[in-house]
Structure formats: C-alpha cells, structure tokens
Image: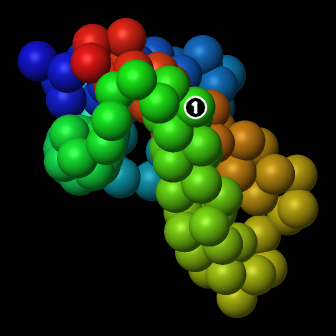
Amino acid sequence: MAVFLAAVAAQVVAFVFYRRNRRGVRWGRDPRVVEAVNFLLLLVTAAMMGHMFARIDPAKWWLFPMMSGGLALAFVIPALWSGYNRRRVRRALALRDALYWMLAYLAMGGVFYLLR
C-alpha cells in the first residue's frame, strides 16, 4: 500500500508541476497515456525506495528525507542533467525538471515515513 501511495504522491507533484505543459508531450497524442506510463515508472521507483526504507530504523525519522532527497540529488538529477547537457536543453527546463524530481522523491519519502 505504501508503494502505491508513494507513487500517487509523486504523480500529484507532477500534476501540479506540469499542469500547464500538457501540449508539449511527445509520447502519443493522449496525455492520459503519458500519465499512465509515468505512473507505472513511478511505481517502479517507489517499490525500490520502499525496499530501501524497509531496512532502516523507523525511529530515525531524518533518514527518510535524507535518503529520498539524496537519491534525487546524487543519482536522478545528475543523470537528467547529463542527458540534457548532451541535447542542449534550456537551463530553465532542466532546473524545473530537477526541482520536480527532488520534490517527487521527497514526497515519496514522506509517504514512507508516515506509513512506517
């Protein structure tokens, strides 16, 4: 249940973050398909994050934001920027996407903390 709710939390962050940018979607014409694929990918991420959090002491509350934010900061954002740098994507877009992933990972970590 926590994995599903963590993916939902990250998807809610995506809806808020990208609500004005629905027309620029390249994967198909139907934004619902894009959101469904995104949700499935977030489920994979949430499952791995849940696997990680299942092995820590729940009393150490600071590990939840530290580890979820650390994953975004040390793995996701550098990978994103590396790809964007090669494709010469505008810095504003890269910053917006980096902020989304940081907030999405922190939201997932928050769900796991609340449901520990």
Pick whichever, 32 or 111, lies toward us: 111
In-image side of 105 versus 112 (left or right): right
Q: Furthest-left residue in view?
A: 1
**How many discs mark residues in the rendered view?**
1
Q: Is residue 42 visible?
A: no
Residue 83: quarter of image:
bottom right
| Type of the residue with mark 1 | Trp
In the displayed structure, 110 sits above or below 67; it is above
Residue 72 rendering spot, x and y as whole percentages: 57, 54
In the displayed structure, 85 sits above or below 106; it is below
Identify which residue is drawn at 52% across, 57% down: 71
Query: SS at mark 1?
Result: loop
Dot 1 alpha-carbon crowd within 10 angstroms: few under 14, some 14 to 19, many 20 or more: few
In-image side of 90 versus 2 (left or right): right
In-image side of 36 versus 31 (left or right): left
User: Quarter holding the C terminus?
Assistant: top left
Identify which residue is drawn at 77% across, 70% down: 89
Q: Furthest-bottom residue in view?
A: 86
Residue 11 rendering spot, x and y as whole percentages: 40, 25
Residue 12: quarter of image:
top left
In the displayed structure, 61 sits above or below 25; it is above
Residue matched to label 1: 62
Identify which residue is drawn at 85% across, 64% down: 90
Identify which residue is drawn at 54% across, 63% down: 76
Pick whichever, 55 or 108, lies toward us: 55
Residue 91 rendering spot, x and y as whole percentages: 88, 62
